[in-house]
Image (cartoon, rainbow, N blue to C red):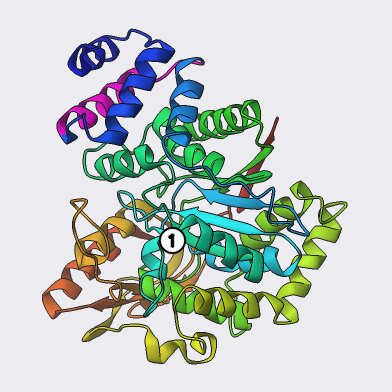
């Protein structure tokens, strides 16, 4: 088979056979396909899609491109369950959710990714913690999950390596917002992780890859369908991404907000609403709670007792980070030279915001990538971001800008002014969870 011929056929709308899909996956895995060929294939899929036969074949091929985790001999006293988000702006949910579920008896081997496009990656956030080792071997992952109950890590070279290479290329070639590529990328990692249940957080709105409701529902339904058909029970929540999640955007800043949440110092109401909704779904899927009421109560108790915070700090220490990170995170997280307010130019109510533009502004500050090899600055971003519905006066801060120079801060401030809308009347508030999709 010639890769250029398969790329041409997919470009022209033809369906590829299972053998042809396997050939492309092998080429991505082994390196026999060049980056240019992979990018061209991704662009062809972006425009032409994958049909109901191609998508499962591609997803399972990616999952089987490397080693698969088997928990059968680990004798875990609870279910192996996980959650995955399709990507958001200010989305630090995983940092709170994994330890909550672990404190309730679940075991969470969370394979996370780097930032993709305008969205932040959980792995990049944890990279701001000194010493944190995000790429353990599979055996090390098994040990941490068994001993702590959760481990948030990245893909090793052995786990879905085809996806790892494709993921990096998609990030910088404008092929992120594709339903089949999103489905195959997400589920290949989750299927390889040996899960017994998965909860998907599928974002919709200006900061999501699936910006409109129709694409969001298609993505959620295909995720649930492909995962369930592959033997992985899956539920999806469609959640709001029309404004920043929580009050921070930027890697170290989001870690700091997560620590404040776990310690009970402060909890943004909409952030908390989504955390508890996802935790409840995970507990029910893992049969750790009989119904939603019990699941939410157990999740709240894990926070109130400090058990979730304790799991987080044990996870950080087990993966090489500071043992006292929970109590002294401010001493470990990086900061910047310039912190300045972005001030409102008129009074009124925050009526909306373009979350994508805010994410792009963080990338421009150095908090994201324009090439796969780019290093990121974990300290830059925005904190104390206003929320939709807030009443504000002229000159009051819309957010604090964290930058390396005054020039960068000025550019970021201009981007924020453009992204945040102020009107005369308070807007109707959108629900955090729009819908639930199950098989």
Query: Residue 352's spot in the image, x, y percent?
Result: 43, 56
Query: Residue 328's spot in the image, x, y percent?
Result: 48, 92
Q: Residue at x 41, y 65 (%)?
A: 134
Residue 426 appears in the figure: no
Whether 84 is drawn above or below 30: the answer is: below
Residue extending farthest front: 73
Q: Nearer the viewer, residue 81 or 278?
A: 81
Q: Is residue 403 left or right of residue 155?
A: left
Whether 294 is drawn above or below 127: the answer is: above
Residue 133 appears in the figure: yes
Please tell me how many numbered marks the rendered image carries: 1
Q: Quadrant of residue 395?
A: bottom left
Q: Residue at x 46, y 45 (%)?
A: 205
The residue identified by callout 1 is 122
Q: In the rendered structure, which segment of residues is drawn in magenta?
A: 36-52
Q: Main secondary structure of the magenta part?
A: helix
Query: Residue 243's spot in the image, x, y percent?
Result: 46, 57
Whether 107 is drawn above or below 35: the answer is: below
Q: Secondary structure at mark 1?
A: helix
Q: Residue at x 59, y 51 (%)?
A: 83
Q: Quadrant of residue 347?
A: bottom left
Q: Quadrant of the C terminus?
A: top right
Q: Is residue 398 magenta?
A: no
Whether 314 is drawn above or below 31: the answer is: below
Q: Crowding near pointer 1: few (<14 within 10 Å), some, many (20+)?
A: many
Q: Is residue 47 magenta?
A: yes
């Amino acid at each position: 088979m010639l890769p250029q011929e398969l790329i041409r056929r997919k470009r022209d709308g033809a369906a590829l056979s299972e053998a042809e899909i396997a050939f492309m996956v092998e080429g991505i895995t082994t390196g026999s396909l060049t980056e240019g060929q992979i990018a061209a294939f991704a662009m062809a899929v972006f425009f032409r899609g994958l049909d109901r036969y191609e998508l499962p074949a591609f997803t399972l091929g990616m999952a089987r491109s490397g080693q698969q985790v088997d928990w059968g001999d680990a004798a875990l006293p609870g279910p192996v369950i996980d959650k995955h988000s399709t990507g958001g702006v200010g989305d630090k949910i995983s940092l709170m959710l994994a330890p909550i579920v672990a404190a309730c008896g679940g075991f969470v081997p969370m394979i996370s990714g780097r930032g993709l496009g305008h969205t932040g990656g959980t792995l990049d956030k944890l990279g701001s913690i000194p010493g944190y080792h995000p790429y353990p071997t599979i055996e090390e992952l098994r040990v941490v999950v068994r001993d702590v109950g959760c481990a948030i890590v990245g893909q090793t070279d052995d786990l879905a390596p085809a996806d790892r290479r494709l993921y990096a290329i998609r990030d910088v070639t404008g092929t992120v917002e594709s339903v089949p590529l999103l489905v195959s990328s997400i589920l290949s990692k989750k299927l390889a992780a040996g899960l017994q249940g998965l909860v998907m957080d599928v974002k919709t709105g200006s900061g999501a890859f699936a910006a409109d409701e129709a694409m969001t529902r298609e993505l959620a339904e295909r995720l649930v369908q492909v995962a369930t058909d592959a033997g992985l029970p899956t539920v999806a929540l469609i959640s709001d991404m029309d404004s920043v999640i929580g009050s921070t955007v930027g890697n170290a800043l989001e870690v700091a907000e997560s620590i404040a949440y776990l310690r009970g110092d402060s909890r943004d109401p909409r952030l908390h609403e989504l955390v508890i909704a996802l935790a409840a779904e995970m507990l029910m899927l893992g049969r750790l709670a009989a119904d939603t009421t019990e699941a939410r109560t157990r999740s709240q108790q894990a926070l109130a007792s400090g058990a979730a915070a304790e799991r987080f700090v044990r996870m950080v220490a087990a993966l090489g980070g500071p043992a006292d990170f929970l109590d002294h995170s401010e001493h470990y997280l990086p900061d910047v030279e310039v912190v300045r307010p972005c001030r409102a130019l008129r009074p009124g109510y925050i009526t909306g915001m373009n979350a994508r533009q805010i994410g792009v502004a963080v990338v421009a500050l150095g908090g994201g990538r324009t090439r796969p090899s780019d290093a990121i600055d974990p300290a830059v971003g925005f904190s104390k971001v206003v929320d939709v519905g807030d009443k504000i006066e002229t000159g009051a801060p819309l957010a604090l800008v964290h930058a390396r120079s005054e020039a960068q801060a000025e550019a970021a401030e201009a981007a924020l002014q453009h992204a945040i809308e102020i009107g005369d009347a308070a807007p109707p508030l959108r629900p955090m969870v729009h819908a639930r999709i199950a098989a």
